[in-house]
Every structure is written in structure tokens, then in C-alpha cells.
Image (cartoon, grey):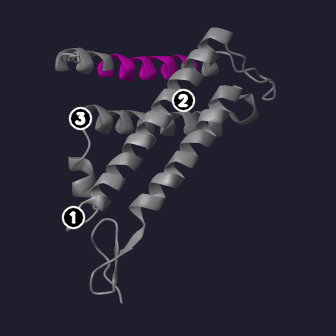
């Protein structure tokens, strides 16, 4: 039985489409949030069920995919003898689509968190949910970025390769 190879250009197109959909959906959420704010400062902005579902679904896709690929890449690097886990080896282990997914996820996430903080109680629930999700995702990423690893001489080194201590 032979396996079917999907052309790289098709996969690249799909990756770009997902990233553009993510940006477009969250741009629509933020714009609609600002267009519908009430003068009383209390009434929560309501979004259509379709926009809420699309934002939740695409965010779940981006969150789980970026986190899992990062985790698998870190594990693969740590399993290689003689290879230190640092920013350059991690970046080298990720393809362009994953790197851009992480950049887009973080950039949009910061925009959504700012939106959430500025609108406060008026923010749609999906904005609050994504804001909490991105903060949790950043917490997990910080665990990798700021982690320490024992070296062969017994000292520890931070994940970025610096900060040797005994």
C-alpha cells in the first residue's frame, strides 16, 4: 500500500489560510467589541453565536497545535545526546508555519488581552476566555524559557544557554 504525499505548496496554503482566518476572526471580535460598547460601562457586549463559535474553535486549534508542537520539539531536542535545548535549537526544530503560528497567536493574544483590560466587564465572554487562555499559554512557555537544566559538570544552565551556576 502506498502513501499519498501532499504537495508542500498545498500544506503551505492551508497554513496561511489558518493564520489569516485566526487574524480575521479576532480582528472582527475586537472591532465588534468596540462598536457595541454601551455608555453605561456595565452592559456586556454580545457577539453573534457564529462569531463566538468561530473564535473559540480557531483559538482552540491554535492553542493546542502550537503548544503540542513546542512540547514535541522540546522533547525531541532533549532526547538527542549532546544537544542543548536553547532558543536557537528550538527555533531550528520548528518549521516556518509553526514559528508564524506562535508569533500570530502571541500578537493577537496581546491585542485581545489589551481589549479585555480596557473594556473590563463589557468584554464578551470569548475575549475573557482567550485572554485567560493566552496568559496560561504564556505561563507554560515561561516554564520552558526560564527553566534550568543540569549540565554534565553538575552546574545548572537556563534554557537560553546562559546563567551558569553551581
On screen, residue 77 above or below 11: below
Cβ–Cβ under 8 Å for marks 2 and 1: no
Crowdedness near tag 2: few (<14), some (14–19) or many (≥20) residues, C-alpha within 10 Å: some
- Of the image marks 3 and 2, the number of the one nearer the N terminus: 2
What numbered label is drawn on residue 93? Answer: none
- Of the image marks 3 and 1, the number of the one nearer the N terminus: 1
The residue under the point 24% across, 60% down is 80
Residue receiving disc 2: 60
The residue under the point 56% across, 38% down is 114
Asked if the magenta segment contains residue 134, the reply would be no
Q: Position of residue 116 (x, y in %)?
A: 63, 35
Asked if one can make out residue 48 in the rendered structure from this viewpoint, the answer is no
In the picture provided, is 88 more to the left or to the right than 125? left
Crowdedness near tag 3: few (<14), some (14–19) or many (≥20) residues, C-alpha within 10 Å: few
Secondary element type, mark 2: helix
**Stretch of the chain drawn in magenta:** 15-30
Q: CA distance from mark 3 to mark 2?
A: 20 Å
Crowdedness near tag 1: few (<14), some (14–19) or many (≥20) residues, C-alpha within 10 Å: few
Residue receiving disc 1: 83
What numbered label is drawn on residue 96? Answer: 3
On screen, residue 19 above or below 114: above
Q: CA distance from mark 3 to mark 1?
A: 21 Å
Q: CA distance from mark 2 to mark 1?
A: 32 Å
User: Which quarter shows the N terminus?
Assistant: top left
Amino acid at each position: 500500500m502506498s502513501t499519498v504525499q501532499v504537495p508542500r505548496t498545498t500544506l503551505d496554503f492551508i497554513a496561511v489560510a489558518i493564520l489569516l482566518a485566526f487574524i480575521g476572526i479576532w480582528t472582527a471580535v475586537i472591532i465588534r467589541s468596540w462598536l457595541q460598547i454601551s455608555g453605561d460601562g456595565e452592559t456586556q457586549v454580545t457577539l453573534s453565536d457564529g462569531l463566538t463559535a468561530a473564535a473559540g474553535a480557531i483559538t482552540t486549534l491554535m492553542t493546542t497545535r502550537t503548544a503540542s508542537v513546542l512540547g514535541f520539539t522540546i522533547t525531541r531536542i532533549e532526547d538527542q545526546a549532546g544537544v542543548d535545548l536553547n532558543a536557537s535549537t528550538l527555533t531550528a526544530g520548528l518549521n516556518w508555519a509553526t514559528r508564524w503560528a506562535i508569533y500570530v497567536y502571541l500578537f493577537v493574544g496581546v491585542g485581545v488581552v489589551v481589549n479585555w483590560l480596557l473594556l473590563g466587564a463589557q468584554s464578551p465572554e470569548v475575549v475573557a476566555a482567550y485572554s485567560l487562555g493566552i496568559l496560561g499559554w504564556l505561563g507554560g512557555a515561561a516554564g520552558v524559557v526560564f527553566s534550568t537544566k543540569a549540565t554534565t559538570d553538575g552546574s545548572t544552565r537556563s534554557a537560553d544557554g546562559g546563567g551558569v551556576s553551581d
